[in-house]
Image: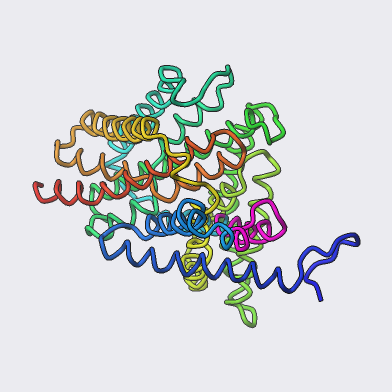
Amino acid sequence: MTLLYTGKNLLMSNEHISIVLLSLTLLLFTAIIAGRFAQRFGIPKVIGEVLGGIIVGQTVFGLFFPELYQSLFTPKSDLSEARDFFIKIGAIFFLFIIGLEINLPKAKTLRKTILWTSLSGLAFPFILGFASVFFFPHLWHYSSENLALPLFIGTALSISALPVIARILIDFKLLKSKIGSIIIASATIDDIVGWIFFALIVNHFSPTETHSNPVITIISVLLVFLFALTLGKKLVNKLLLWSTDRKDGDTLFLGLTIILVFLTAILAEKIGIHHVLGAYLIGLAFAKSKLHKMHNALRQMVLSFFAPLYFVSVGLTINFFQHFDPLLTLLIIGIATIGKVGGVFFGTHMAKLTVKESLVISFGLNARGAVEIILATAAYQVQIIDEKIFVGIIIMAIVTTVISGPVIRSALARL
């Protein structure tokens, strides 16, 4: 008996299905245990999940039990492709949830502050990241005239991790405060701009993608954004009203939501941007409408199954010891922190905030977490970065996220 048949090859036997299910079970179990363990030490769950993946991946499990590792996580096979399918679906749904949870504050009086904070928080780390590739080409293993790597490094170091930042603000009861409003709005702008830059880089420079005119890509991305925030909102409202009046309206609404997520992801891929950005945009469209109770059911499913699988898989196939470059990793952590903290501090200072307020906002926006990890993974998959850079960015995301909480707590104690 088989699961799939193409007419030529039997793709997956019952034994193979069992191996895939066993590997997914091990990954999910590892993610749950590592995530809960991390939370006990006040570390975001996502960081624990990534560290758990490093342990169960090539770095530790593959080193001590290579044969068992190969049997469970055989790379470049039908088994790995089946497992990767669930992982990629996890990334799509996780970005949808991120977009869904964005609620920009109605802070008209803070527009100037948010503008200064966002722009300087983008510009400083981008310039430092971009320039570092040319100043230290031997560390980055950069020897070509292709601008993909410097542009990506500048972009990657410019973004923040909105979900992690939101969680930190909730923990400190700052989400609805003046400081919280500035951080959330600035992080949202930075992430949206960062994803647009990434779309352009992938479309124009990636060796694995079909290239098109960058002007067309920019226009396409802006049109999709405009659609998500205008007509997309109206479509969601009509969908909500229509499904409410139908039998089994809740399940109908959830099913149609998933269809919209998939269709938007496909559309994003067709116009040359990453599919996760499409899911993020439809999430923004839903966020601008009244949230349906079934979104909470989807959110629970994503956070308990798809997202843990995705983040634990980050450390699965790469040996972090073998590809760890201490000088490169220190450089990435240094310029990421100096660029983001320095840039945001400059912006908030120009907006006339106090030094202590600026410090809290700067380190709040320095947390990179989940979004950085997704961006780095996508760049590695399309061959913009190599294993050493990938490992360095993942470690930077972990370090900046871990230090944000204690620094904010210390700064708040002095406010």
The quadrant of the image that shows the N terminus is bottom right
Q: Residue at x 68, y 36 (%)?
A: 208
Asked whether residue 86 is drawn in magenta, I would say: yes
Residue 316 visible: yes
- Percent coordinates x, y for residue 127 in the rendering: 40, 23
87 or 33, nearer to the observer: 33
Q: How is the image coloured?
A: rainbow
- Percent coordinates x, y for residue 397 in the rendering: 38, 44
Give the vertical position of 403 relative to 207 (above or below). below
Residue 314 visible: no
Tell me if 177 is positioned left or right of 205 in this view: left
Tell me if 16 is positioned left or right of 395 in this view: right
- Dividing the picture into quarters, in which one does residue 340 lie? top left
Q: Residue at x 40, y 22 (%)?
A: 132
228 or 59, nearer to the observer: 59
Span colored in magenta: 70-91
Q: Residue furthest bottom?
A: 247
Give the vertical position of 223 relative to 36 (above or below). above
Q: Residue at x 52, y 38 (%)?
A: 387
- Dividing the picture into quarters, in which one does residue 21 lie? bottom right
Magenta stretch, main secondary structure, is helix
Give the vertical position of 49 relative to 139 (above or below). below
Tell me if 387 is positioned left or right of 219 in this view: left
39 or 118, nearer to the observer: 39
Badge count? 0
Q: Residue furthest left?
A: 414
- Percent coordinates x, y for residue 327 in the rendering: 36, 30
Asked whether residue 16 is drawn in magenta, I would say: no
302 or 169, nearer to the observer: 302
Give the vertical position of 82 relative to 107 (above or below). below
